[in-house]
């Protein structure tokens, strides 16, 4: 099953640090120091695009709304997001035009590769698709906005302003409010600019974090993170980063759950965060101490909030029961997840997981 919402809710995961840094390096090689671009600003030009699928545009038309989503053929999370974007395009076909733009592609003759890739995706990419020319999106959109990782989406409103920037897995509630006329761009702009400042500080701290993950010595990294938490107490992502960094270390992992409890308390009514943190504890590749009771506590609350009707939450809960050796209960819950899921890749994945549970074969 696509873990799109789980990974998005979990925030800054350790496994993405190297990826984000690589993306930043790619951007830095191609771009000079850019002017800052933020929510509320006029969207940069969209004319230097080679359109591959669907009807492209040369400029944003007044009165029309768009989602500009950045991806690459080598980006696994981007590929997982394709069906979700296709679903959104179908849902908002008369209100919002979704455009996926390939950026940061590697190699010399990249167009044939991208064309073949998009063709192979078929209906998974059921929206307009193009590729940047002359690094137009990387240079004019991503770098100025301080966006160092993909997938990354931009909502452009009817006046040509950027109304939102973020992971496409988090865009659903934004589009719902936007279409209903309830989205406040100015209010979100203030919040987003705070986020940009924090991300700049985190990028500056990245070498220290990478050193900690490579050496296993957290003595320098943890105090630095604590300073950021004191400066930005409202930013859950920083505590999540500390939690995951501690979980990746044999010495600190058992102590990490004190931080985890703080995250649960602060997000007790946010099922996506609870689902994400539970899934990270259960399946994170770098986790040294899997506290199954903690994971179950988080996912039980998430299930209460979603009234037992969210397939991704049920999938996580089934995994928790399975890891607790309560296979019968895991099968029961996974069957419900399958029944509630819509037809498509997600449901297929849920069925495969159910089969593993039935055969008592530990899931990956």
Image (tube, rainbow, N blue to C red):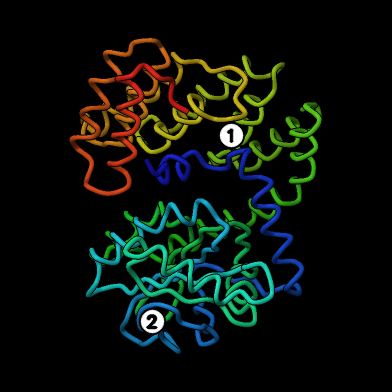
Label 2, residues with CA under 10 Å away: few <14, some 14-19, many ≥20: some
Residue corresponding to mark 1: 239
Identify which residue is drawn at 60% across, 79% down.
136
Label 1, residues with CA under 10 Å away: few <14, some 14-19, many ≥20: many
Identify which residue is drawn at 29% across, 29% down.
314
Give the SS element for disc 2.
loop
- Left/right placement of residue 41 relative to residue 241 reads left
- Left/right placement of residue 86 relative to residue 253 reads left
Give percent across and percent down for residue 175.
31, 62
Residue 326: assigned label: none
Give the SS element for disc 1.
helix
Give percent across and percent down for residue 291.
51, 15
- Left/right placement of residue 311 relative to residue 166 reads left
Give percent across and percent down for residue 106.
66, 67
Task: Kindly give the residue lying farthest to the top in the view shown.
Answer: 325
Q: Is residue 327 above or below residue 309?
A: above
Residue corresponding to mark 2: 159
| 267, 45: nearer the viewer | 45
Mark 2 / mark 1, whichever is N-terminal: 2
| 6, 307: nearer the viewer | 6
């Amino acid at each position: 099953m696509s873990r799109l919402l789980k990974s998005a809710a979990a925030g800054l995961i350790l496994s993405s640090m190297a990826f984000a840094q690589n993306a930043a390096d790619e951007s830095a090689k191609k771009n000079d120091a850019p002017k800052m671009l933020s929510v509320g600003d006029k969207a940069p030009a969209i004319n230097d695009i080679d359109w591959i699928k669907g009807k492209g545009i040369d400029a944003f038309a007044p009165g029309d709304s768009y989602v500009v989503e950045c991806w690459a053929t080598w980006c696994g999370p981007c590929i997982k997001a394709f069906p979700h974007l296709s679903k959104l395009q179908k849902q908002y076909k008369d209100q919002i035009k979704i455009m996926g733009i390939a950026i940061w592609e590697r190699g010399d003759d990249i167009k044939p590769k991208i064309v073949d890739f998009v063709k192979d995706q078929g209906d998974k990419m059921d929206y307009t698709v193009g590729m940047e020319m002359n690094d137009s999106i990387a240079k004019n959109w991503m770098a100025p906005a301080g966006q160092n990782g993909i997938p990354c989406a931009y909502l452009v409103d009817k006046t040509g302003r950027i109304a939102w920037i973020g992971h496409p897995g988090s865009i659903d509630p934004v589009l719902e409010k936007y279409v209903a006329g309830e989205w406040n761009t100015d209010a979100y702009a203030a919040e987003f600019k705070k986020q940009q400042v924090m991300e700049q500080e985190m990028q500056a701290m990245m070498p220290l974090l990478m050193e900690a993950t490579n050496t296993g010595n957290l003595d320098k990294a943890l105090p630095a993170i604590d300073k950021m938490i004191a400066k930005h107490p409202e930013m859950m992502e920083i505590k999540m980063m500390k939690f995951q960094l501690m979980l990746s270390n044999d010495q600190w992992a058992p102590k990490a759950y004190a931080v985890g409890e703080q995250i649960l308390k602060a997000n007790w009514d946010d099922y996506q965060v609870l689902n994400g943190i539970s899934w990270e504890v259960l399946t994170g590749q770098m986790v040294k101490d899997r506290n199954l009771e903690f994971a179950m506590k988080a996912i039980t609350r998430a299930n209460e909030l979603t009234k037992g009707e969210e397939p991704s939450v049920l999938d996580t809960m089934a995994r928790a029961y399975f890891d607790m050796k309560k296979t019968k209960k895991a099968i029961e819950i996974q069957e419900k997840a399958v029944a509630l899921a819509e037809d498509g890749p997600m449901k297929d994945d849920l069925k495969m997981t159910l089969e593993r549970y039935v055969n008592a074969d530990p899931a990956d």
